[in-house]
Amino acid sequence: PEKWDTYRRSLVTGGKGSRIVVTTRKKMWG
């Protein structure tokens, strides 16, 4: 899905984006 595409981009970019992804993952997966 498009969401995962943006998700992976954030991971690859790292930095602030990585932090946001980690926080989002915790919310998504509980």
Image: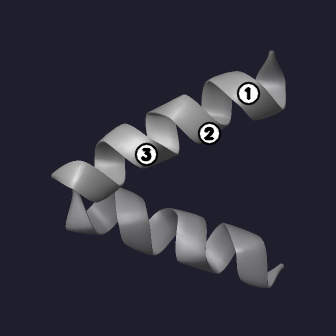
C-alpha distance separating marks 1 and 3: 11 Å
Answer with mark 1 or mark 3, whichever residue precedes in sequence: 3
Q: Does residue 29 appear to the left or right of 19 in the view shown?
A: right
Three-letter residue code for mark 1: Lys
Taking depth in this image into account, of 8 and 21 the one nearest to the observer is 21
Residue at the spot 64% in from the left edge and 34% down from the top edge: 25
**Mark 3 sits on what residue?**
20
Total residue callouts: 3
C-alpha distance separating marks 3 and 2: 6 Å
Vertical arrangement, residue 6 with respect to residue 25, above or below: below
Location of the C terminus by quadrant is top right
Check whether the beta carbons of the residues at disc 3 and disc 2 lie within 8 A of each other. Answer: yes
Color encoding of the figure: one colour
Check whether the beta carbons of the residues at disc 2 and disc 1 lie within 8 A of each other. Answer: yes
Residue at the spot 47% in from the left edge and 34% down from the top edge: 22
Residue at the spot 32% in from the left edge and 47% down from the top edge: 18
Indicate the secondary structure of the residue bearing disc 2: helix
Residue pushed farthest left?
15
Looking at the picture, how far across and down is residue 3, in whole percent?
74, 73
Dot 1 crowding, Cα within 10 Å, few <14, some 14–19, many 20+: few
Location of the N terminus by quadrant is bottom right
Three-letter residue code for mark 2: Thr
The numbered mark at residue 24 is 2
Residue pushed farthest top?
30
Dot 2 crowding, Cα within 10 Å, few <14, some 14–19, many 20+: few
